[in-house]
Amino acid sequence: MSALPSQALRRAHSSEQACAIDPPLFALRDLTVRYGAVQALTDVNLRVLPGERVALIGSNGSGKSTLLRTLHGLVRPSAGQLRRDGAPRVAMVFQRPFVLRTSALNNVALGLWLRRVRWQQARAQAAAALQRVGLQAIARQNARTLSGGQQQRLAFARAWALRPDVLLLDEPTASLDPHAKREIEALMADFAASHGNAGPQQPLTTVFSSHNLGQVKRLASRVIYLEHGRILADLPVHDFFNGPLPEAARLFVKGEIA
């Protein structure tokens, strides 16, 4: 099952226009991912362009996390092709970030040090990243003692310190309380409005998964609906929420498919 013909034509036309200006950061062609006997993604064809804010939606097990991990390089395709243009610098924030039993500052600095940044410089950049996410006051606090929302902001600081061109986010607000969710959404919007490592001419690209459709409306420019590892709809956010959809996507938006 695929997107409706009129939608597919509109999307193809807009993609052709965009590609004439900027090559895609990621180009997936007939990409399949298997975990043993389980097929997590099937024949995925997808292009992600610079500066896009792409939301991945679908029920649990639809393939959202696998797609994000494949874009990051954590998962290798079982079949098909994944091409990256210009070797973009990619950072990923997970739903439940792992934090080390050391200070918040060191949690950020160690990621930079592992990328061969001198320790003194890494700590300075880590301090700037913590300030960017509003955690400068707890820089010396053990990261394991932070609240869930603070740990997620710490994960954003680690990602930001790497100066990525692409930020991948896997359900970044799923386990947070309403106040923490608002803080993380504000960071997502702020980061999406900034620029990547390549400079002011290269906008930051974000790809995030979410079950929160309000969040998708607020933050995305494009929505991809997945079911059983296949893309059934790929549309600009306005068209997705205001136009006709494949039946499965329509039921998901109505809340009849969890």
Image (spheres, rainbow, N blue to C red):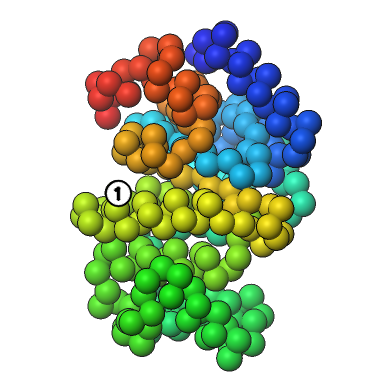
Residue found at x 55% / y 14%? 7
Residue 204, given in percent of the width and then of the height, sits at 60, 52
The residue at the point 68 percent across, 57 percent down is 200
Total residue callouts:
1
Q: Residue at x 68, y 19 (%)?
A: 13
Occupied quadrant, residue 183: bottom left
199 in relation to 54, above or below: below
User: Is 27 on the left or on the right of 139, as rendered?
Assistant: right
In the rendered image of this protein, does residue 16 appear above or below residue 25? Answer: above
Q: Is residue 21 visible?
A: yes
Name the foreground residue: 187 vs 60.
187
Residue placed furthest toward the top: 5
Q: Which image quadrant: the C terminus? A: top left
Q: Is residue 199 above or below residue 112?
A: above
Q: Pinpoint residue 223: horizontal percent, then vertical percent.
A: 48, 31
Would you call the spot at circle 1 few (<14 residues within 10 Å), some (14-19), or many (20 or more)? some
**Which x, y percent locates residue 4?**
52, 10
State the residue position of label 1.
174
Q: Position of residue 224 (x, y in %)?
A: 49, 30
At horizontal 43% and vertical 42% (from top left) the residue drawn is 219
Q: Is residue 35 visible?
A: no
Q: Amino acid at mark 1?
A: Ala
Q: Name the element at disc 1.
A: loop
